[in-house]
Amino acid sequence: MDEFQSGEETSFVVDEVSNIIKEAIESAIGGNAYQHSKVNQWTTAVVEQTLSQLTKLGKPFKYIVTCVIMQKNGAGLHTASSCFWDNTSDGNCTVRWENKTMYCIVSAFGLAI
Amino acid sequence: MEIVYVYVKKRSEFGRQCTFSDRPAETNVDIHPDPSLAANFIERNPVDAGAQCASDMSEHEVNTERFEMESEGVNHLEGGWPKDVNPLEMEQTIRFRRKVEKDENYVNTIIHLGSLMEHCIKQNNAINIYEEYFEDEGTADVADEPPSAKTINVFRDPNLIKRTATHLSWHPDGSKKLAVAYSSLEFQRSSKDMSYESYIWDLESPNKPDLVLRPSSPLVSLEYNPKDSHILVGGCYNGQIAYWDTRKGGQPVELSTVEFSHRDPVYGVIWLQSKTGTECFSASTDGQVLWWDIRKLTEPTETLVMDISRKGILENALGAIALEFEPTMPTKFMVGTEQGVVISCNRKAKTPAEKIVGTFSGHHGPIYALARNPFFPKNFLTVGDWTARIWSEDSKESSIMWTKYHMAYLTDGCWSTIRPAVFFTTKMDGTLDVWDFLFKQNNPSLSVKVCDEPLFSLRLQDNGRFIGCGSQRGTVTLLEVSAGLCTLQRNEKNLATAMFERETKREKILEARHREMRLKERTKSEGKEEDTKVESEEEKPEELLARVQTEFFDIIEAELRRRERAARLPKTQVPRPGLPERWAEAQLHPGAGVSGGLADEPSAAARAGVEPPVLWGDQRKGPCDE
């Protein structure tokens, strides 16, 4: 008989996603200092890597990933989000990462199909 | 083993509706401003940023290396003789030959070589590899393609103030050079800074003239000596004649003296056929034609005043603009004048009065170009005012053929040197027309717009393929005409001959008829009695007057009646014939007479108390209603 993997919960697991995001940021930006010329590249890299890892989880989810990189020069940044969804199956996860010269904030939203 | 992915969903959950719930806003990021961090940065004030919507470009330089070439030849001399044999000495060579012949292998070698040779010769004879395959077919029929002309090159006046290219002359051998005379022909328009230079252009380098000619006054006409291609003669704006030798540079070798030169610009200068090849003659609008020998330009060898009354009075003379000379008829020449008359002259006449043989009048304006047909010297082309005309020497009263009146002045014209039925003309609107009167007579068979400014001069190269046109801004355009226009068609000569003869005959017949009619009238008027003649003359105007008057009133009556009819109809528009309103008003005063119609209109209307109907549709108040 076919063996099938059962027991996978079709709900958004925040820790799992958070780990994926942290890995992606580390690999993309890692120990770099802020460079205006490279920022575009970095944001794209972070988002793409996160998304590919999330889809690899194989869950029946729609994912939305955003990434903000901000230089540390004294300015402030505030963002908020609000969602209208199914609380039991959908969820989101935000990771704030920083180093000496910049902040990086990545949000991932997952919506069950 | 197959990898199967299955995801599990509770059956009850299939197609389950989404239970929406609102998750209120939550702050994702909250980073407060920290001014101390700004200390890490230096403020840049002001910031200079360039904004340009242009694509990025890079500059590269390429320089071809000069490649040196050398022509070398190899001279092949008879060789193969051994060292001790001197090939020039007959004895030694004969002795050597005899020695070789006695050699054993000689015969075998020869036979072997001989068979090889035989094979090659037989092969050669079997097929003629140099055979011409399509000889019999002849050249393809070029007449099928539509005529066209394309610009090959453009030579611009390098000076800032542009002058008109008034005359072009091709180099006599090979036509690789073009001499262009530049001057400003507009009356008193030449400014101080206008340069006097004229140029000789090499066709290969349109950017820089080959030679610069520096006369003391701008050149109006310029001609190469057909015998000696280094000599050029030019006619100046102030009436002098100058000649150049291209080997000696840009300054004229000699200039004619002002006292004996022309008093007006020299519009035409042509070289004569002479043994020495140094004679030329010039024509100008001061009414004189002067003959010169360039070896002695201090005074002309001969003068002729263009006075048609043959009295030689300069005041009555006609200004000459175009000059024509055919080397095959060295004693005759023709002059085209400002007044539109072509004067044909004979150089060898005894007295100046006899020099002027005949005149041809027909143009309304100055004759800018005069050219004999190279194939039919009896027929010549004149270009002036708005037409181009073809004349035959036999019919002096009028031209035998002429083009229609164009919209722009025609400025120059010339025959094709290859096809007897083709000629070219240039116009003030910058177009070059090619006429082929065997093909089309009403319109040019090709009309090319060369440039926007007027074209002033035209010259065809001797091979008939290239034309140079000079414009008002000093631009000389070199055009190449399509093959159809410069290859002799079959039968063309016969057809052209037939056409010319036919037209000449027609003109002659017309002339004869005219003469007859004039003669008849003269005899008629002489034969009649005086009284009847006078009476009939008087009667005519009165009769005419009465007739016109009755006609006029008839028309008015008819109009009146029509109006009555129209007024009775319920305000519908009645289409009127094309009569003006005022005639209807004037009929109230029949005694007004023929001319009274318009003048009496206000008074007539006032007396009738009717306002003159201005609008078409205003039929309500007609004069008949009163």
Image: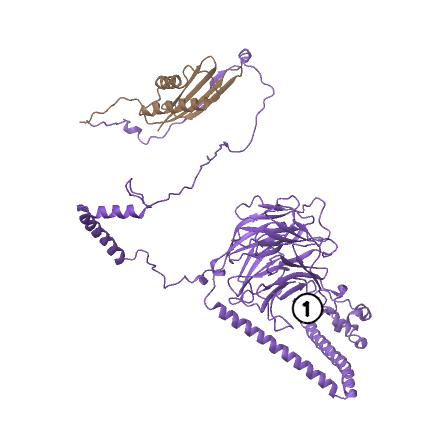
Chain colours: A brown, B purple
Residue at 78% x, 81% y: name it: B542
Q: Amino acid at mark 1?
A: Lys
Assign the N terminus of chain B to one quadrant of the image. Answer: top left
Q: Which residue is mark 1?
A: B355
Secondary element at image label 1: helix
Looking at this view, is B478 or B329 the one in front? Answer: B329
Q: Give the residue at x 22% y 46%.
A: B100
Residue A107 place in picture, x, y as percent: 42, 21
Name the side, left or right, on which B541 lies relative to B136. right
Q: Residue at x 29, y 40 (%)?
A: B84
Left or right of B30, for residue A14: left
The spot of residue B135 in percent (x, y) is 36, 62
Camera-side residue of B528 and A11: B528
Q: Quadrant of residue B586?
A: bottom right
Dot 1: chain letter: B
The quarter of the picture where residue B376 lies is bottom right
- Is residue B208 in view? yes
Q: Quadrant of the C terminus of chain B?
A: bottom right
Position of residue B226 measured from the top left corner of the image (x, y, whole percent):
57, 56
Residue A20: give x, y in percent of width and height.
36, 19
**B621 left or right, relative to B442:** right
**B524 or B579, nearer to the observer:** B524
